[in-house]
Image (cartoon, grey):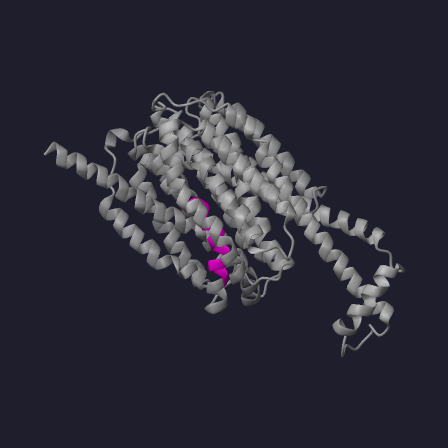
Amino acid sequence: MHENSLQASRYYRWIVLGIVMVGTFMVILDSSIVNVALPHMMSAFGVNRDQIEWVSTSFMLTMAVVMPLVGWMVGRFGHKALYLSALALFTVASAACAFSWSYNALIVARVAQAIGCGAIQPVGMALVAELFEPHERGKALGIWGTGIMVAPALGPTFGGYLTDTFSWRTIFSINLPIGLLAFLVAAAVMRSEAGAARRKVPFDYWGFAFLSMALISGLLALSQGQEEGWDSRLVHVCLGFTIVGLVMFLGIESSVEHPILPLSLFRCRNFSLSIGLAVFRAVGLFGSIFLLPIFLQNMAGYTTIQTGLWMMPGAVAVGLTMPIAGRLADRYGPRWLVVIGTTLTGVSLVQYGQLDPLSDALMIIGPQVTRGVGLALMMAPLLAAALNSVPKERVATASSFLNVAQSVGGSFGIALLNTYVTNAVQRHAVGIGELVGAQTQTLERFTQHVSGVAFRGAHGVLLSDQAKGAALSAQAVFHKASVMGFENGFVLGGLIVLAGLPLCLMLKPSPHHKVPP
């Protein structure tokens, strides 16, 4: 009888892991699927670009505010109740997004959707850590984390296909059957925790308020800095609120009896290092996923669907490697796996410093596969090391703040690389323009060869050969400068990831890690 119960318990853990993985994959996919449909939404509701950006911005800011609440909510309501509530809210909000009748209705629905999404990811991680013993968490988190790593790569392509083939509303309505099925299975299978597991701890209102202020202000500055200018008043005000919010938050957390983030967690070395390395990992994940599709579409001329196919090998590499990385972490500990993963990820981005619009398939796919393996070796061991290092009753809190670090790190990486590439393009355009003057023999020969083809049958103000040549040379200079700017951006991303190597070497093995003879 006992053996049958034990076997059922083992099956139960893996079934719940599968349920949580589906939910996590769905919400992460939704986070990355929307951007390609924004132009269609803009036309549907008759709004400008600044307004439509709030479809993404409101989602991002709401998620960042919800994630820190998960630790307290798990203690108060339990994993099952919270997961089912978040999944139900996300599914209903997805339906509201799909049937939005106005721009304002869409924004409200996106905020509701983000509340569910912000809870599902960290509570899923906490639930997996709760179900599996420390010596098995690496393998389990490796499987669960596959969705987090694969979904951002698939999202833009899948979203582009649905939008072009059907309508932008289908990127939301596709969640309805999946979300409903996942909810019904989870409700039937998942067990509720015993009442003793609930902790009726007072809520840290002031800590949450100042943390929310810091997160919202900081993420708003990162998302708007490129548009408004980093020296703009908006960015300065946001950064001021961020600093004040962080200082007040840390002061409150060090003095209240039941903080939303116990600062004692940072005495757990692996947790602290994992928070820091989450930022480096996010630059490698989101930075490359942000830069490479833009390069392939704008510089190499591929369509959205073709770009998605080029991105597929990296996603496959992550999916295949994550469970293996988790198993290795359970057996050997995190340090050298994370060192290898960080090195591979950084080197793969540096390799893209040689990418150009005429690069062959090996040049596009090879670094992607390397990066996929590297990210998997970074993520699964780091998550297991972080959650194994904290007390069991703090696992939910630790998972929520690991997700916050990942989210903030991704926003920081995208903002940093976007700004750097923009500045690099301008710098290279000036440099190339100085080398290729308007009166050089090289430019004249170039003009004679291409102007007759490029402007054949053209009418209007571009009548003279000199004007035609000037237009073509300007396009050529800007295109070359853009390629060089992207190359510089990839290299910078790689160097940032490699800068995390000293932190990797400071990771220590958990007590259960014993290297076999």
Q: Position of residue 161 (x, y in %)?
A: 48, 63
Q: Residue furthest right?
A: 439
| Front-lying residue, 356 or 200 | 356
Task: State the image quarter where residue 120 is shown.
Answer: top left
Q: Residue at x 50, y 63 (%)?
A: 102
Q: Residue at x 84, y 55 (%)?
A: 436
Whether residue 219 is visible to the viewer of this picture, yes or no, is no
Q: Is residue 301 above or below residue 514?
A: below
Magenta portion: prevailing SS class = helix
Which range is magenta?
A: 147-160
Residue 299 on the magenta span: no
Q: Where is residue 356 in the image (x, y as percent from the top left)?
A: 65, 53
Tell me how many marks there are.
0
Q: In this view, does 317 lie above or below 141?
A: below
Q: Position of residue 387 (x, y in %)?
A: 39, 29
Task: State the image quarter where residue 348 is shown.
Answer: top right
Q: In this view, does 439 lie to the left or right of 267?
A: right
* Quarter of the image with the C terminus in it: top left
Q: Residue at x 60, y 35 (%)?
A: 242
* Quarter of the image with the N terminus in it: top left
Whether residue 441 is visible to the viewer of this picture, yes or no, is yes
Q: Is residue 249 above or below residue 305?
A: above
Task: State the image quarter where residue 48 is shown.
Answer: bottom right
Q: In this view, does 412 lie to the left or right of 23?
A: right
Residue 155 on the magenta span: yes
Q: Is residue 467 left or right of residue 261?
A: right
| Front-lying residue, 35 or 117 | 35
